[in-house]
Amino acid sequence: MKHQPGRLTARAAAVLTCFAYIGLALTGCARPSSRATGPTSDDYYLQGIAAYRGGDSDSARKSLAEATRRNPNHAAAHALLGDIYKQSGDYKGAAGEYEQVARLEPRVADNHQRLAVAYHFLNRLRDAVASYLRAIRIEPTDWKSNMNLGLAYSALADHNAAIEHAQRATNLNPTSAVAQTNLGVVLDARGNRAAAEEAYRKALELDPDNTAAAQNLAANLLDQGRPFEAITAVQDLLPRIDTPALRRRYGEALAQAGRDGPAVKQYRKSLELDPDHYPALNGLAGLLIRQYRDGLLLDDKKRDEALELWRQSLRLNPNQPGIETQLRMWQPKAG
């Protein structure tokens, strides 16, 4: 797998794990206001907690925002507000709240770890690295921060540091299939195919239902030119777990093995499970174009379907210059 610096690798398993910050026993709660009447920041914080536990995130967000407005140093309110933003996919909002928590409680490793995760999802990789390192300096045995730091370094193409921290995560938690899978990810990014394969296999020994490890193992074996072993790796998992990505990997392995008919079937099955799974659109289009080319350019239906699949893929993800090139290359010329 070719690595693109500055981007999260597509193979990262369960990726960026972080701790839940829920509960009342949090450090940094402000003392009640000295005002005799009216709700205090703590009152709004408690309202936010109640709303959050009741599943009303909007009300919780409003109450917690009011708590932090009344007392900007209310670390617990900032923390839970950050969690709510993160859970809704607003990592920018989450980062802003976690920055306040890290400022208010700089000696708590978890505060820096949470901030690092938010930065990581925002692709602010150097900021993520700095925050992961702060968390690790406070808590050197934090395997999750070490694992995620390895992924961030890998995205920055600092492969030696990536492998060092990903390996440390597996040493700190040798029973974690997630840590083993992500060790495989950073080894793959470095081009250490055999070592990555070993890590993925170890992850599957720890958790036979680890979909990410099975998918990555299949891709790794394909990179090594071993499609039949890749087929076996996917077939072992499919009876228990069936996902669009796994079916797509199955199609890739079958195609590389020269079994075009079954490969087309698996690509189509992937798209039945998720019509917006654009890697399957690209894989099926590429296979149809190969069949069109091998058929002496006579079967225009295959070409036309491939072109439409690539168009669908670009509508879903416009940032695919390679697919744009293929589309232009195979587009029928006027006249």
Image (cartoon, grey):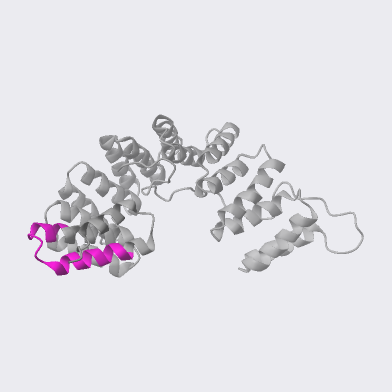
Question: Where residue 260 sits: x, y (%)?
Answer: 13, 59
The number of numbered badges drawn on the structure is 0
Relative to 76, say whether 163 is above or below. above
Which residue is depicted at the point 92% across and 60% down? 36
From the viewer's side, name the closer residue of 53 and 120: 120
Picture quarter with the N terminus: top left
**Horizontal relation, residue 127 to residue 297: left or right:** right
- x and y percent of residue 123 in the render? 50, 46
* Helix, strand or loop: magenta stretch: helix
Left or right of 170 on screen, residue 195: left
Describe residue 266's horizontal placement relative to residue 10 as left or right.
left
In percent of width and height, residue 240 lies at: 29, 61
Q: Which residue is nearer to you in this view: 328 or 276?
A: 328
Which residue is at 28% across, 43% downward? 201
Q: Magenta region: which residues?
A: 290-312
Can you name the residue that lies furthest to the front here? 335
Tell me the residue at 64%/67% (across/down).
58
- Would residue 11 be found to the left or right of residue 51 on screen? left
The quadrant the C terminus occupies is bottom left
123 and 36: which one is in front?
123
Compare residues 2 and 162 and report the one nearer the observer: 2
